[in-house]
Amino acid sequence: MNPETFSGDAVIDAVSAVFMVVGALMSLAAAVGLLRFPDLMTRMHAATKPQVLGLFLLLFALGLQMRTWWVWPVLVVAWIFQLLTVPVSAHMVGRAGYRTKHLHPELLSTDELEAVVQQAAGKRGFTDDDGDEAAAGR
Amino acid sequence: MMQLVLTVTAVVLSLAAGGAIIRIARGPSLLDRVLAADVLLAIVGAALCIDMAANRHLNNLMLLVAVSLIGFVGSVTVARFVADRREKTRES
């Protein structure tokens, strides 16, 4: 370490460097989760890390590096924009995954949608569970 | 120190992008590929952020917002089309 480690600039540099490395590790964690998890839902859980926490850490590091005050509202707007769009796309992907049966039911601990789906299928006169065969059978 | 941080983050982000591309190539379903493409876009955004922070400029900020917008529109559109196609084949 250099002798001026404890001056203000060096401390800010160190904090932003740590945030940058941790934010990059979030992306690596998402990639490992994408490769290792068995299911669409669990992969969605892993994929959220760089989108929210990783982006937050990197934008924070950027704000620390710029050392001006007027960049912070811009960075906050960018992060809030990401916070608004990520849940919507995750909801759409999760709903499409549930409807097209891209999940392993034996891995779920609870399935809160199953009762609703069964009830709606019973009202309409066919079960949604087995697709075409059950609909043709009734 | 910034050079060391740049090297470490470059290696980490390259490994992450490789993992996401492997999942895009190998994903069993379309939704897995969409999710991996979303992660790849997030990794690109992280690289843009690190470039801005290391070189102390703000040129890529609009590009960062545009990248996140593209990821949002793309994944929502593909999810809609997956749902629609399955429902139509079930009805016919």
Image (cartoon, coloured by chain):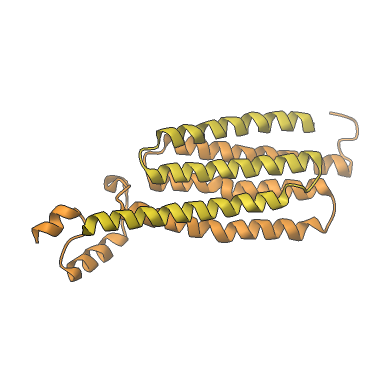
Q: Residue drawn at (73%, 47%), measured in percent from left and top?
A: B60
- Find residue B30 and report its image quarter: top left
On screen, residue B61 above or below A37: below
Q: Is residue B59 left or right of residue A43?
A: right
Quarter holding the C terminus of chain B?
bottom left
Residue A35: % across, % down: 45, 34
Residue B6: % across, % down: 73, 32
Q: Can residue B76 be seen by looking at this rendering?
A: yes
Residue A97: % across, % down: 36, 51
What's the colour of chain B in the image? yellow
What's the colour of chain A in the image? orange
Q: Is residue A87 left or right of residue A69?
A: left
A79 and A134: which one is in front? A134
Q: Can residue A16 be seen by looking at this rendering?
A: no
Q: Residue drawn at (52%, 46%), measured in percent from left and top?
A: B38
Residue extending farthest to the bottom is A123
Q: Residue drawn at (77%, 38%), measured in percent from left and top?
A: B54
Q: Residue drawn at (46%, 38%), measured in percent from left and top?
A: A34
Q: Is residue B65 left or right of residue B17?
A: right
